[in-house]
Amino acid sequence: MVVIKDKSVINKIRKAKTRRGKRVLESREPLIVENTKKAIFTRGSNASQRCVQLLKDFCLLKKPNSVYFNRKEEWHPFDDWSPVEYMCGKNDASLFAYASHTKKRPNNVVIGRTFDDHLLDMVELGFDDYRALNEFKVPKTAIGTKPIVLFSGQPFDTEHDYQRLKSLLLDMFAGPQVDSIRLSGLEHAIQFVATDGRVLMRSYKVALKRSGTRLPRVELEEMGPRVEFTLRRRHLASQDLWKRALRQPDATRKKSSSATKNVKRDALGSTLGRIHMRRQDYRRLSLRKSRAFRKSSKEGISSGAKKTSVVPVVDTNDRPVVDTNRSHDMPPKKRVRFES
């Protein structure tokens, strides 16, 4: 346990003055299972109309876990990222997107994320061949639909920068984590293709048609947005910071295979386990003190004496006959002497 003694650090720790403020600070504390990542979208002072429209389309795809700010910002993330950290911390968001347009870098968008209220990584992308979401005159999916995110192309598996870009895009568009999903819930698909130094983005609406078999026939209808990205500047996290961001608490880690050994489930869902024990000596078992296990007080035969049983013999008239040959097995009668 680390004890902070520096008063300058203690004074910087935020303390709640009201009950509402206390609830807000408690909701922002680290969680064992984190919530769905929230994103903020903001524009620069010189952003063009196409840049603003791209941010709005991304915000619609991310809803309801997104916030769009229409005010013009004078800062740029690659020049000073402290305003980004402040806005993400204030809005409890870990993802951000910033759009700008200059003569040197036209049609520019920056996508990044934070960790522990500090910048983790961000990538600057230039875009062209853009078609907005409203330019496709087809029915759209409902807000909050979890999409299928697909990545195609060898650079996403081999090149380090594209691997980080893949992780960043997956956090931005994947949506909430779920354990299972029904087939009819697959309504939206987003595909990223890396080819010839460009990243192509396509968005499709999934339609399930009748096929005459058990499995339906799948049809894809492009619903937008459509855009082509070019990788520009990037600010990636160091290896140590990346490992800290990927660290998971002990409560969420899966148990090792040795802990679940000899455990299985039957068809009804019951858990069955097999326990291996050493061979036991049943003669030393401590049984319940019951009358059935007590020795009779009338039993005069010692434990070492031979026990016999009398079997009655029945003649032809169904009358019992005493076996005289077994008289020697009976115990002798005691003689009593009376003295005057």
Image (cartoon, grey):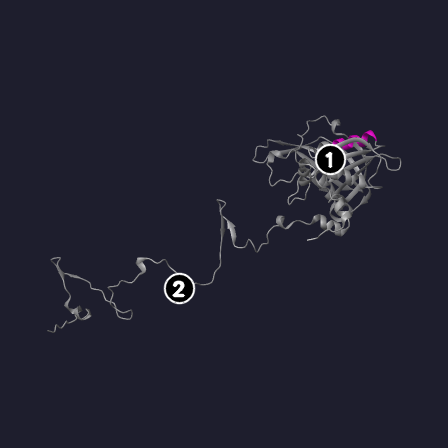
Residue 166 seen: no
Write the residue at 74% across / 29% down.
133
Q: Nearer the viewer, mark 1 or mark 2?
A: 2
Mark seen at residue 202: 1
| x and y, in percent, of residue 153 in the image | 74, 43
Label 2 Cα neighbours within 10 Å, binned few <14 / some 14-19 / many ≥20: few
**Quarter of the C terminus within the rendering:** bottom left
Write the residue at 32% across / 60% down.
293
Residue 110 position by quadrant: top right
| x and y, in percent, of residue 140 in the image | 68, 28
Residue 87 position by quadrant: top right
Q: Does the magenta stretch include residue 166?
A: no
Q: Is the magenta stretch mostly helix, strand or loop?
A: helix
SS under mark 1: strand
Q: Which residue lies furthest to the top in this view?
A: 137
Sequence order check, earlier mark of 1 and 2: 1
From the viewer's side, name the closer residue of 275 and 118: 118
Q: Does the magenta stretch include residue 56?
A: yes
> In the image, is residue 7 above or below residue 142?
below
Q: Do the residues labelled 1 and 2 touch (CB within 8 Å)?
A: no
Labels in figure, total: 2
Amino acid at circle 2: Arg
From the viewer's side, name the closer residue of 336 and 278: 336
Magenta span: 48-58
| x and y, in percent, of residue 83 in the image | 80, 39
Q: Which residue lies furthest to the right in this view?
A: 103
Question: Label 2: which residue?
Answer: 284
